[in-house]
Amino acid sequence: MAEQKKTSQVNPDEISVSGLKHFSLIDLLMIIMIVGLVSLAIFPKIQDGKNDIIIRNSLTKMQMIINANEDFKEEDGDYAFDISQLNLGDAVADDFFEFTLNDTAIVATSSKIALNDVTYYYLIDEQGFRISPDSKKIIDDSIFDKPGK
């Protein structure tokens, strides 16, 4: 019986020195593009979730200021005009939002969660929340329906 030699034609561009197939530059670029597209879909959702937690935390602190301001009015007869009058100390210290108080509103402002300042108000006379027009992209109105939750 005669042995038949099997010869295979191998393209030298498809096999590396170790004998394994390797990726071409096009394959690598396609993988990078797919990973980039997936990250474009995922990262904004993750950031929105983080922003929501930060805003809810600041809303809890805003509620503490509102309650302390109401207590101040019962004792003094008028609302406080400065947040230091409420004697809340570090209870309302926040890493992202700064709270200020005037005779008509309590204002929460942050420059750390978006490119532009994010601001929302609690109007004392109306006893309701408002969002500055530029902040409506970051803060959803429904967050004020259930503060602290």
Image (cartoon, grey):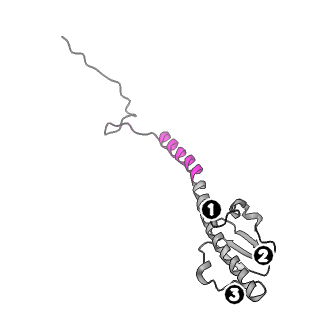
Does residue 76 show up magenta in the picture? no
* Residue drawn at (59%, 82%) of the image: 90
Q: Residue drawn 75% across and 64% down?
A: 134
Q: Which residues are magenta?
A: 15-42
- Calculate the distance from the C-alpha at mark 2 to the C-alpha at mark 3: 16 Å
- Looking at the rendered image, the quarter that the C terminus falls into is bottom right
Instruction: Using the rendered view, name the quadrant where residue 135 is placed.
Output: bottom right
Element on which disc 1 rests: helix
Q: Which mark is residue 85?
A: 3
Identity, as a three-letter code, of the amino acid under mark 2: Ile
Which residue is most to the right? 125
* Label disc, if present, on residue 124 of the rendered structure: 2
Point 72% across, 75% down: residue: 107
* Vertical position of residue 30 compared to residue 125: above or below: above
Residue count near mark 2 (Cα–Cα under 10 Å), binned few <14, some 14–19, many ≥20: some
Of tags 3 and 1, the one toward the viewer is 3
x, y percent for residue 38: 55, 47
Q: Would residue 8 be visible to someone looking at this image?
A: yes
Image quarter of the N terminus:
top left
Name the residue furthest bottom: 76
Instruction: Give residue 52's mark.
Output: 1
| Pair 2/1: label in front | 2
